[in-house]
Image: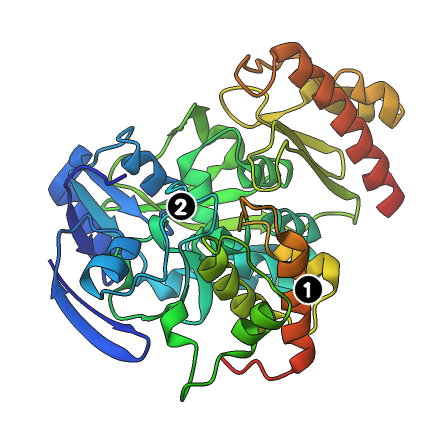
Amino acid sequence: MKVDLTVNGKNITADIEDRMLLVHFLRDVADLTATNVGCDTTSCGACTVLLDGESVKSCTVLAGQAGGHEITTLEGLAANGEMHPVQRAFHTEHGLQCGFCTPGMVMAIVSLLKENPHPTEEQVRTGLEGNLCRCTGYHNIVRAALAAADAEKVTS
Amino acid sequence: MIPSSFSYQRAGSVEEALSLVSEHGDDAKFLAGGHSLLPLMKLRLAAPEVLIDLGGLHDLSYVNDEGPYVAIGALTRHHDVEHSDVLARQVPLLAYAAGLVGDPQIRHRGTIGGSVVHADPASDLPAVLLALDATLVARGTDGTREIPIGEFFQGLFETVLEPDELLTEIRVPKPASGAWSFQKFTQRAIDWAIVGCAVQDGHVALVNMGGTPLRAAATEAALAGGASPADAAAHAAEGTSAADDIRATKAYREHLARVLVSRALTEASSRS
């Protein structure tokens, strides 16, 4: 089938198998490999991207379903060489250890802060229940989310 | 994991969806948010030859106050049910329970209609809608029919819908009072309920206590006879057929049903 979607502001048209998952489209067709395949069962959140600005797990969306929609991956967050406030907060708060869950965590937090720009710590923890960190580095991830909210510069 | 091959078709209207499904018959499945169906397809537990994507049918996504009831389009996402002002005012049980489905990413994709027609007894919203006495509206090539939710679930993943029928709307009568509660017991944050319980006025429905969502009839009869919440909850497991599985034994589920029903009835009566 032919699919036509926008990834990080760039239009991509491709001929794909009908059964192709969005995460494989992003990694293998769009050549954007920040988005990781973790559990592949809608549990861990490593494959989280934004679909029309909202977090989704791209292992459980068909590339065909994303046709006509706008996808944002981690690669699409930084603007003009400046890290997105959530990325910068992960840097300053040391919000990662091995880094595998990080792209999904960052995208989930961007979506969370868009819906709730000033969350409490509890709201951040509940809002990240769909993202697992196997290093169990949650404390600094939560700190990063709260620091990004404080920066009040979240624009995406 | 990759699903078996299928042909992806996108429906532009309800009429087109019905025409596609009557063309392909049993080989076709409707795809809404896909958060129940796609995981099963990736495990090859489901292998439809044709997927009819309903994602473009935006006119089936709404929450409308219709006077005596609230009408909810079948393609309304859990996220939109959770954040609906109409439901927060009129049917807070449903808005609250929708906010506990899965996680935020799942609620951005999953739909209320998809959850109902998937008919997984471990899902929250079928039991919630059972406690609310909802009516389901289905469209087929022969017309529209209304199905009381008490007659809808036939067994594990089985409903009375014909293969060429599409659930289009869920009608929830406005509850008589604010006496509601939803209790869900899970081992990990995003798991399905090991057991759950929805209470609205005198109605008590159970999640994951049998092959379908169930009303706790003995508890309801005890309440109607004037029993206290604690005494009525002691009957919660009567007439159920909970499974023994990797997550819990049948006896443990029965115990949980009694405990959760007791908590739910107590919370509901504190709200009335």
Q: Secondary structure at mark 1?
A: helix
Q: Is residue B180 above or below residue B56?
A: above
Chain containing mark 1: A
Front-most of residues A51 and B30? A51
Q: Is residue B224 left or right of residue A110?
A: right
Which residue is depicted at the point 59% across and 50% down?
A129
Q: Quadrant of residue A58?
A: bottom left
Q: Which residue is disc 1 drawn over?
A: A143
Q: Which mark is residue B186?
A: none
The location of residue B138, given as percent across then percent down, is 37, 45
Chain of the residue under label 2: A
The N terminus of chain B lies in quadrant: top left
Query: Which quadrant of the figure has residue A4?
Result: bottom left
- Image location of residue B16, percent across then percent down: 20, 57
In the picture, residue B214 is in which quadrant? top right
N-terminal of the pair, mark 2 or mark 1, is: 2
Q: Which mark is residue A38?
A: 2
Query: What amino acid is found at the position of numbered circle 1 in the picture?
Result: Arg
